[in-house]
């Protein structure tokens, strides 16, 4: 399993997962032409496209991927059918074929949104962004995996002192908003184990977070779990490929 976060943040989200016999794209938040520029036009055929939810930063480039690759689209959002009515959409919580199992589970956002577990060749990736909190049963479900891509959206103090109107601050901090650095750290402490090798922190707010603040928030985890490879996903620059 090879993983590359190509873009992550409020302006667009795209993650590529390459398996031995299948390529999976998580979200289509940037047009294909933008992604091709970032990858020097080296981009594989996409067999499966998973859409977590219908906010623009996750579907902005959807039609370009559908037109080019005609992938199987997996989602839990029935709203997607009205957006791309002629696409090959499977509204489901689970997809399985000979070399991959994909599980979609509910998150808490202001539109229907799902997290993802991809299992292939005895390796497991968890992908979670755009949620205000995680239920205890969800934490049990995602515990002890190889790789996590998980939202670390904002620093609470910086958010409270930023220029956003108060209702927007309330939305971000609420149960249908986004995970703070502090909350994400609490969850990671519950779910990562000696099996976990890589944690990618994603969907950082450009105004209310920074790589330095994220690193500071996670320093106890890095001290305790010295085997963890911690990465921070970026909005404008793809992360290097990670193989598990």
Image (cartoon, rainbow, N blue to C red):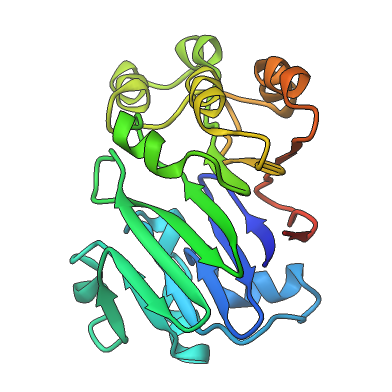
Is 91 displayed left or right of 103 in the figure?
Answer: left
Question: Vertical placement of 189 versus 240: above or below?
Answer: above
**Residue 85 or 150: which is nearer the viewer?**
150
In the image, residue 101 lies at what x, y percent? 44, 70
The residue positioned 76% from the left and 71% from the top of the image is 39
In the image, residue 27 lies at what x, y percent? 47, 63
Q: Quadrant of the C terminus?
A: bottom right
Question: Vertical placement of 20 versus 185: above or below?
Answer: below
**Residue 43 or 227: which is nearer the viewer?**
227
In the image, residue 196 lies at what x, y percent? 66, 41
The residue positioned 67% from the left and 62% from the top of the image is 3
Q: Residue 168 is drawn in which quadrant? A: top left
The residue positioned 61% from the left and 70% from the top of the image is 121
Is 240 displayed left or right of 221 in the figure?
Answer: right
In the image, residue 71 lies at what x, y percent? 44, 85
**Is residue 185 visible from the viewing direction of this image?**
yes
Q: Quadrant of the N terminus?
A: bottom right
Q: Residue 130 is drawn in which quadrant? A: top left
């Amino acid at each position: 399993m090879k993983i590359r976060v190509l873009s992550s943040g409020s302006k667009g989200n795209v993650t590529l997962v390459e398996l031995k016999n299948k390529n999976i794209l998580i979200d289509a938040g940037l047009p294909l032409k933008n992604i091709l520029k970032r990858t020097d036009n080296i981009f594989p055929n996409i067999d499966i496209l998973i859409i977590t939810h219908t906010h623009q930063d996750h579907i902005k480039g959807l039609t370009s991927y559908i037109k080019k690759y005609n992938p199987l689209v997996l989602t839990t959002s029935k709203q997607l059918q009205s957006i791309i009515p002629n696409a090959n959409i499977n509204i489901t919580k689970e997809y399985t074929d000979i070399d991959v199992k994909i599980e979609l589970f509910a998150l808490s956002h202001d539109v229907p949104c799902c997290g993802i577990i991809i299992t292939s060749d005895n390796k497991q990736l968890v992908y979670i962004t755009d949620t205000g909190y995680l239920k205890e049963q969800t934490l049990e479900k995602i515990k002890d995996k190889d790789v996590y891509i998980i939202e670390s959206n904002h620093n609470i103090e910086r958010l409270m002192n930023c220029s956003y109107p108060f209702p927007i601050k309330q939305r971000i901090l609420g149960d249908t908003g986004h995970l703070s650095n502090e909350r994400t750290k609490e969850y990671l402490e519950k779910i990562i184990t000696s099996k976990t090798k890589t944690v990618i922190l994603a969907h950082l707010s450009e105004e209310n977070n920074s790589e330095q603040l994220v690193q500071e928030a996670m320093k106890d985890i890095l001290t305790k779990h010295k085997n963890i490879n911690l990465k921070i996903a970026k909005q404008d620059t793809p992360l290097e490929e990670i193989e598990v």
